Amino acid sequence: MTLIAKNITYRPDEEFHLNDISFEMNKGELYTLLGRTLSGKTTLLKTIAGLQPFDSGVLLYDDQRFDKLPVWQRNVAMVYQQFVNYPHLTVYENIAFPLKQRKLAARSIDEQVRQSIKTVGLGGFENRKIQELSGGEQQRVALARSFAKKARIMLLDEPLVNLDYKLREQLRDEFKNLFSAELSSESILIYSSTDPLEAMQLNGHTIVMDEGRILQHSGAKDVFENPATIKVAEITNDPVMNTMSGSISEQEIVINSDFKLKLPDHFKNLSLGSYIFGIRAAELTIHENGIPFTLEFSEISGSETFLHLENNGVSLVALMEDFVAIDAHQKLMIDINVDQMYAFDMECQLVKSPFQE
C-alpha cells in the first residue's frame, strides 16, 4: 500500500502553504518532514489527516482517492506538539478511548492498550491520572494512544519540541527503536521536525521542505552528505552551513586577495570559474598556519563555543567542541578543512560534494 500525493497546492490569501507537493510513501517505512517553522510541514500532515482542505491536486492511498474520504474513515493517528490527552481519565482510559469509540471487543481493547503501554515504557502507570505525569510521560501517553489505534498512517507533528532539552535527548534516543518495534508492515509513519539532528537519528526517508515546497526527498544520510541546493544545506545543518562566493583557478580556491585555499582533490575536475563554496562550522579550527580572521563575537552553548569570524566581508562561523574564552576583535588564524568543502553553482545548485565519487 502506498500513499501518493500528486501536485497538491494550497494557497489561501495569495500565499502558498503547499506548493505543487508530490511524493510516494510506502507502508512499513518512516518518513521525516524536515523544515523550519512555517515551511508547510504541519499543513501537509493536516492535509493527509483530512483536517486541511487544499485547492488542487490528488491524494491517493492504495490507488483510492484518499482525499475524498471523511476524517473518520481514513484510519489516521496524529500526535501533536501539545500533549492532547483527556485530563479526567487515567493513562489506561486515555489510550483505550479511541478504541472504545470504534466499538472494539473489550478483550481486544485490553490487549492493544497493554501492548502500547509496554511499548512506550509506561508499565505500572495504567491507573495514574494525567495530572500526575511529567511532560515526557504525557507525550508517551499520546504516542501510546496512536500506537493502540494501529492506524495505517501515523502522523507526529514535532512531538518533542515542547519538552525540556534533557528529556528531548532521552526520548530522541529511544524513538528510533520504538518506531522500529511498533511500525508494522502495513503502516506509514510520518514525523515532522525542525531539527536536522533528529532527522539524522531517526534515519528514515527525509523530505526537506521550505515555503510549502519539497526541496529534496532522499535518505537522511544522503540529504546530509549531498544537499541538492544551498537552501537544503542551510536547513539540514545547525549551525547553518557556511557559504562564500569565490572562484577556482588552476591550483587554488580564491575567495579574495587575502583568502586563498588549496584546491582539494574532489574539485580538480571542476571547470575554472565562479562558484559558491560551502563548509560546515565543525570543519573550521584555530591553527597557526590558517587564514587570518577577526573574531566578531563568540557564543557559548552548553559545552560548545561558536566563533563568529570575518575576513574582508566574508563572515563564517566556527564550531569548537569545548569552552573557548577569547575576547572579541582579536585576530585568529583559522584552518579550513578543504577536503570537506562543497561547491554550488551560481544558481545555488550542488555541483560537487566531498562524498561524491
Image (cartoon, rainbow, N blue to C red):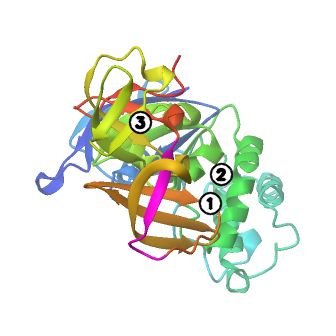
User: Magenta segment, which residues?
Assistant: 327-336
Identify which amino acid the numbered label 2 is placed on: Lys
Image height of 305 relative to 312, above or below? below
SS at circle 3: strand
Distance (Cα) linking label 1 and label 2: 7 Å
Of all residues shown, which one is farthest toward the right? 124
Q: Main secondary structure of the magenta part?
A: strand
Nearer to the camera, 122 or 302:
302
Mark 3: give few (<14), some (14-19) or many (20+) Cα within 10 Å: some
Give percent across and percent down for residue 208.
42, 41
Residue bearing mark 1:
98
Which label's residue is closer to the chain start, 2 or 3?
2
Q: Which residue corresponds to the image point at 27% horizontal and 42% vertical from the top-left?
A: 257
Q: Are marks 1 and 2 in contact (CB under 8 Å)?
A: yes
Nearer to the camera, 211 or 237:
237
Identify which amino acid the numbered label 1 is placed on: Pro
Q: Which residue corresponds to the image point at 31% horizontal and 44% vertical from the top-left?
A: 244
Residue 133 located left or right of residue 255: right
Image height of 131 relative to 303, above or below? below
Give percent across and percent down for residue 18.
27, 45
Distance (Cα) linking label 3 and label 1: 61 Å
Image height of 258 relative to 346, above or below? below
Distance (Cα) linking label 2 and label 3: 57 Å
Task: Give yes or no for residue 328 being in the magenta stretch.
Answer: yes
Residue bearing mark 2:
149
Task: Give yes or no for residue 223 being in the magenta stretch.
Answer: no
Give percent across and percent down for residue 9.
24, 40
Residue bearing mark 3:
261
SS at circle 1: helix
